[in-house]
Image: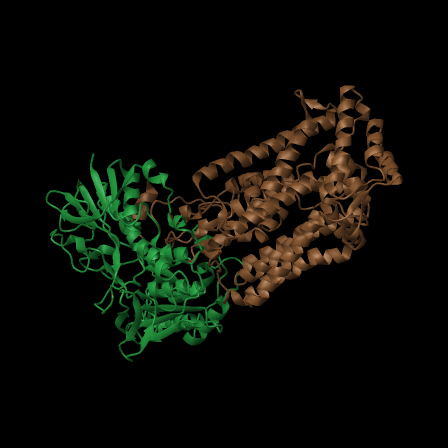
Chain colours: A brown, B green
Amino acid sequence: MKTIQHTGLGIFLTGLTVFIALIFLGEYKVSPELFNTVVTNKGIKSELFINDIKNNVLEKTFTSPFKFSRAVTSAIKSANASHKQNSEWDKVIWDKPHSFSYAIAKEAGIGIVKEHKWLFWWLTFGLGIIGALLFIIPQLITLGAPGIKNDGIYHKPATNRGWIGWCVFTFLVAFYVLLYFRPDYIVNWTYVVDPISKSLNGNLASQWFLYGFIYCVVMLVMAVRMYIKYRHNNYQLLRTTSVLFFQVVFAFLIPEILVRFEKPWYDFKNAFPLDYDFFFSWNLNELIASGGLGLFILVWGVVLSLVIVPIMTYFFGKRWYCSWVCGCGGLAETLGDPYRQLSDKSLKAWQLERWLVHGVLVFALVMTGFTLYTYFSGTAAVLGIQTQTIQDIYGFLIGSIFAGVIGTGFYPIFGNRVWCRFGCPLAAYIGIVQRFKSRFRITTNGGQCISCGNCSTYCEQGIDVRAYAQKGENIIRASCVGCGICSAVCPRGVLKLENAPEKGRINPTEILLGNNVDLIELLKKK
Amino acid sequence: MEHIVIIGNGISGVTAARHIRKLSNKKITIISDETDYFFSRTAIMYVYMGHMTFEHTQPYENWFWKKNNIDLKKGRVTAIEAPSKTLHLSDGNTFNYDKLIIATGSKPNKFGWPGQDLNGVMGLYHKQDLDNLEKYAPNNKVCKRAVIVGGGLIGIELAEMLHSRHIPVTFLVRESSFWNGVLPKGESNMVNREIKAHHIDLRLGVNLKEIKSDENGNATSIVIAETGEEIQCNLVGLTAGVSPNISFLKGSKIETGRGVIVNRFLETNFKDIYAIGDCAEQQIAIDERKPIEAVWYTGRMMGETVAQTICGNKMAYKPSHWFNSAKFFNIEYQTYGWVWAQPKNNEARFYWEHPNGKICIHINFDKDTRQFIGINTLGIRMRHNFFEKVLNEKKSVDYVIEHLADANFDPEFYKLHEKEIVAAFNKENQTNIQLKKKSWKRILSI
């Protein structure tokens, strides 16, 4: 079994190595025809830029994406600088330089990867999947009989912030930085998934298609790990299946197929304000222009956030979304599961959490207010602040850095729910509903707690579950996503996630059940 | 300001301190030389197994004590001078108190076995035992085999711990079946099977004769009394129960038996000296309980109670119905009320076991009145609140069987076995009980 696992690990690392190496393969050469098309499609009016490209890029062979990117982006920057100085606003190229460069590079790339897309798919994704499964599936036997399997978690460098954790951290952060800010470096990665993209939406793969695809693959593979690790626990099995379903079908297949039918890309489960650009004018315009389906999406999006989210939360708690439906939650519960114990349980972290997560919610709501005001009034600025600027800041700080780079990149360091706990505005919103108006609670089983701390340790949201359990108090916390792991790891059967009548849901106790009945009564009366 | 001094920073002492703080602004000092801060003794197994770090076993962050104005003093009390209310510490200093709570817990039993103090021979109770374990059994290269002597809750925990590091374990149990002084046959057998399923070399009905050592005083093997068999090992775990840790009280004139003798108010024979937790021995045992209860929960309850008395609301220690829980490898155990290993004359039993051999439920009830007396479950979680109420209201076994759905505390979506259990009960007792649907109204009494 160990041999199979080591072979699997080897295969996986080979796939990963090829994947990383892909960045450095291939060449880029822009033909005059290609460039003319770009100029026409993008409506480029800057002769400075056109000449710069003609002199320095056209018909030249670039041996790396970095050089190519530098040539294109510097042409944009210098042209823009000069146009801005001369106030030639119509000539300024407003596209993000690296996205612009990506669009050209995608077409301009030549070489082995582009010519053998499926081969490289197998050498990267194929090997990665096979290797990972060979590593994971033998755990059916190596982990022993079904039950809680946390042996050695704090002895292993992968899960105790050791060197493997830091390597994974570096890789994930680098991946997100490239994805969000340097898509023109990872054109080769997108070639690999072109055939799949074509078959789904009819187009070549963008970096976002690539991301969606990786997301699904990672979740699928790591869900197998969850199925094995928690095979004694039906709650975990069902929950994992549910997040997997919503990711693959709702966040990936349906939107891509919508695109195929020239409808707007839309993830039906992604609720505002997590879906922060839902009310952005480009989205509203696109939806309104898309006929019946667009209008349906518009109404659905509003109803989802304002009606369905709070009602479902009333009946089932925040968990119905955060750990049964949400994509961010889905990744956290699959890829992130090995890191759940690394979340900070201190009171300080809780204080920071409340400021941050509610701060982001306020930020998102204010931004949306500005956006809608701008949309309906037609003025670009509110109170002297450009709506576009606010949107850009939000998109950069929250949408990319917080949700992506920190939210996922920091899994191996700060645990798997950094984004959900500290940053997600939807989580903040649902949390408020859960805290004040919900049937959901984690019931503490009378006096059975022995304060061992497994529940707190494995709470991905950094809730000090034990602090409640050892007082015999039910756990009612805005941040609880109802993953159910505290209940699973409890060695004494103390915790149970339940939906029940609101009465008695919050039960502060002085003395735990099992002590002197008169004393308990006495303190209740106080 | 009255100065309350507590010796021992375990669950009993710390609970007492917390509740005294809630009820008063008395000066509180906790003295311990085991660790700087309170930790959960029951969790040290998870540190060795790598589920948690030691810091995770500390229920309160380090700032908690200062914020709540509870002084922590590191030191070992060597003697108590009750008349002058003075404590003598091992560093030669003295310390005064107005009221004293002795909460020094237990120490592992040693029955005078030859070699019981050798290197690599240890109990599993203190933080220091955890450190020793890391020293003598960090892995299966340093520790080729471990022998555990004594088949109780700590013994099986130690077996699970060593197993997690792939160290072969021989488990010597004096009884003919695991913990069968407490567990009835069905449960005990199930645990035997679980132990063996984890490849633990379980030896039932045997005793330790001696522990042998090399010239450096390290344990190298043990000899079994009954067979004379010698088993090579690098670690010997002595887990044959615990007894009160009170040897420092010798000469203090504080009345002791096996533990510190206390009355119902947890008072010793000296005014202003109390004893709680594992080290306290009730003059007269309460109900069916033992005079010394070395259990987490009872320690906590005594702490809750003594705090009331010290703060002017004199209160007897009067625990409600017995409950307990444990985990035997992958099998969770809970008990509410009493299910003795052997039925008493007035008792009848109902035992149901799942065909997979890992789940069972065992109910004890009165033969004539059918009053429910207690329940054991393995592999099923039960609701404490439900059984507390059932026992308070002296409900019948039939009521319990009828309301099993209310009683269940398993996580959502777990396969429930209530229908099979009810059917088996009906068949065995010629009854026609229908399982009632779970009712929140009943569960929450609303």
Residue B291 visible in the picture: yes
- Judged from this view, the residue extending furthest toward the right is A33
Residue B272 visible in the picture: no
On screen, residue B86 above or below B240 = above
In the picture shown, does residue B405 fall above or below A431? Answer: below
Residue A5 percent coordinates (x, y): 58, 64
| Quarter of the image where one finds residue B325 | bottom left
Hey, which quadrant is residue B205 in on the image? bottom left
**Residue situated in front as seen by the camera: A144 or B326:** A144
Q: Residue furthest bottom?
A: B227
Q: Is residue A212 above or below residue B207?
A: above
Q: Quadrant of the C terminus of chain A?
A: top left
Q: How many discs appear?
A: 0
The residue lying toward the viewer, choosing from B22 and A513, is B22
Q: Quadrant of the N terminus of chain A?
A: bottom right
Q: Position of residue B116 (x, y in %)?
A: 25, 66
Q: Is A195 rendered above or below residue A95?
A: below
Q: Position of residue A61 (x, y in %)?
A: 81, 42
Name the foreground residue: A149 vs B318: A149
Q: Residue at x 87, y 34 (%)?
A: A40
Q: Is residue A187 left or right of residue B260?
A: right
Residue A118 pos. (x, y %): 77, 57
What residue is drawn where x is 44% and y is 45%? A464
